[in-house]
Image (tube, grey):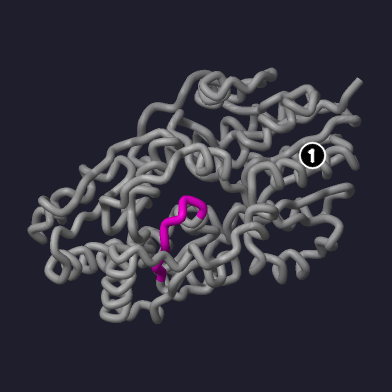
């Protein structure tokens, strides 16, 4: 009988999935395709997501009903989410007898409600993933990292959760950690993870990018992201205003449900005629829109493992970013960089890159993508994941 693989997924509380959720779903698809029996610990929302993506397997429910909609940015909403996660965690602990000593257990996040149950289980192979490093305590106290929330509650929870999870998981025997950025390696080494116990993974959808044909480049700039200060939204809008004055028929595109958050500011800047809001789109439509754009702007103050950069890159769309630490180790010369937080330099570089693209000159055409594809396709990531399971 083949090994049963348990995915602990207590962090999905709606059907609106994001990058880390897609990463988990791709691994689950590959595991099911390889013939393993799958079991998922999670809530009703997870059950809906699995049905939507046609992933078979048993769902061990850890909630009584889907969590109601809350304001995640407010203190009340954050505590409501914490209470919901704690209830799921307690129920997961009570249901750990579903995991046998010949099974594999995988925490799909680095949060305590997934990692601690995996650590407590009797599974013969225990696995987890580290998607992004939480801010350190000093950074939270001084608010020196841009993703630290003003109230600091969510940031403190993130820091304490990741610290506890990693330290607890490091004590496990027969463990393996997947991590998404090479700059995480020193921390994992300090915690005692051996090279044989860790695997660098990524995952980009080359198949969809290849399936969507080349498009006419009708948008000069494109952006996808959360409306958050860490994403450099002020610099993004200032750059659009600069480009609208400098370039004839300048057109910008926002992909995603961003109209409510950004339209008032776009109107204040007099950019309504220059900006298109796509609304929510499918993965195929996202690829088509990226291929319809000349330049992806990334004026972020901080990034973890920015998937959007890779997505734009494999669509043949140039990227301009501030030279913050986490981008160059992943993407190297596939990105054009501006001096960190130098808005004038960023704006000037954006203008020059758009003019080159309008003239038919795309720097990505001259760069080899074969090595990046070989190491970072979904197929490569899925193979790495299955290899760890097979050696359990």
The question of residue 275 being in magenta is answered with no
Q: Which residue is disc 1 drawn over?
A: 386
Residue under the point 88% across and 49% down: 173
* Residue depicted at 24% across the width and 54% down the height: 252
Q: Does 39 sit left or right of 13 as displayed? A: right
Place of residue 125 in the rendered image (x, y in percent of width and height, measured from the top left): 85, 40
* Residue 28 shows in the view: yes
- Above or below residue 280? Residue 255 is below
- Provide residue 164's location: percent of width, then percent of height: 67, 55
Residue 317 lies within the magenta run: yes
Q: Quadrant of the N terminus?
A: top right
Quadrant of the rendered structure where residue 251 is? bottom left
- Residue nearest the viewer, comparing 219 with 392: 219
Secondary structure of the residue carrying tag 1 is helix
Stretch of the chain drawn in magenta: 314-321
Q: Residue furthest front?
A: 360
Residue positioned 35% across, 77% down in the render: 341
x then y, percent, for residue 82: 49, 41
338 or 139: nearer the viewer: 338
The percent coordinates of residue 286 (x first, y second) are 40, 41
Q: Nearer the viewer, residue 232 or 89?
A: 232
């Amino acid at each position: 009988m083949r090994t049963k693989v348990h995915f602990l997924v207590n962090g999905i509380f709606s059907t609106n999935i994001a990058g880390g959720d897609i990463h988990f779903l791709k691994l689950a698809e590959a595991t099911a395709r390889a013939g393993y029996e799958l079991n998922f610990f999670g809530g009703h929302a997870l059950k809906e997501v699995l049905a939507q993506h046609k992933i078979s397997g048993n769902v061990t429910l850890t909630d009584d009903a889907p969590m109601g909609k809350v304001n995640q940015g407010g203190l009340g909403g954050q505590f409501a989410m914490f209470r919901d996660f704690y209830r799921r965690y307690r129920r997961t602990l009570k249901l750990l007898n579903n995991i046998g000593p010949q099974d594999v257990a995988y925490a799909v996040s680095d949060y305590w409600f997934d990692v601690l149950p995996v650590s407590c289980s009797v599974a013969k192979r225990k696995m987890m993933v580290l998607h992004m490093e939480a801010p350190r305590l000093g950074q939270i106290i001084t608010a020196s990292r841009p993703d630290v929330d003003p109230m600091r509650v969510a940031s403190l929870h993130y820091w304490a959760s990741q610290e506890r999870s990693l330290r607890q998981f490091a004590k496990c025997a027969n463990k393996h950690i997947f991590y998404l950025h090479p700059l995480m390696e020193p921390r994992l080494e300090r915690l005692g993870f051996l090279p044989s116990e860790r695997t660098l993974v990524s995952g980009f959808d080359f198949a969809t990018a290849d399936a969507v044909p080349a498009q006419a480049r009708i948008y000069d700039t494109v952006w996808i992201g959360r409306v958050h200060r860490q994403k450099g939204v002020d610099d993004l809008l200032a750059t659009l205003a600069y480009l609208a004055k400098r370039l004839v028929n300048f057109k910008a595109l926002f992909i995603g449900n961003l109209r409510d958050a950004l339209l008032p500011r776009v109107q204040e800047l007099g950019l309504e005629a220059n900006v298109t809001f796509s609304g929510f789109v499918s993965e195929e439509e996202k690829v088509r829109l990226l291929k319809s754009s000349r330049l992806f702007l990334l004026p972020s103050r901080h990034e973890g493992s920015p998937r959007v950069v890779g997505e734009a890159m494999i669509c043949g769309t140039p990227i301009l970013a501030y030279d913050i630490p986490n981008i160059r180790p992943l993407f190297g010369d596939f990105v054009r960089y501006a001096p960190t937080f130098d808005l004038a330099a960023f704006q000037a570089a954006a203008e020059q890159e758009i003019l080159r693209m309008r003239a038919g000159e795309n720097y990505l055409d001259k760069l080899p993508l074969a090595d990046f594809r070989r190491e970072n396709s979904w197929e490569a990531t899925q193979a790495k994941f299955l290899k760890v399971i097979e050696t359990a």
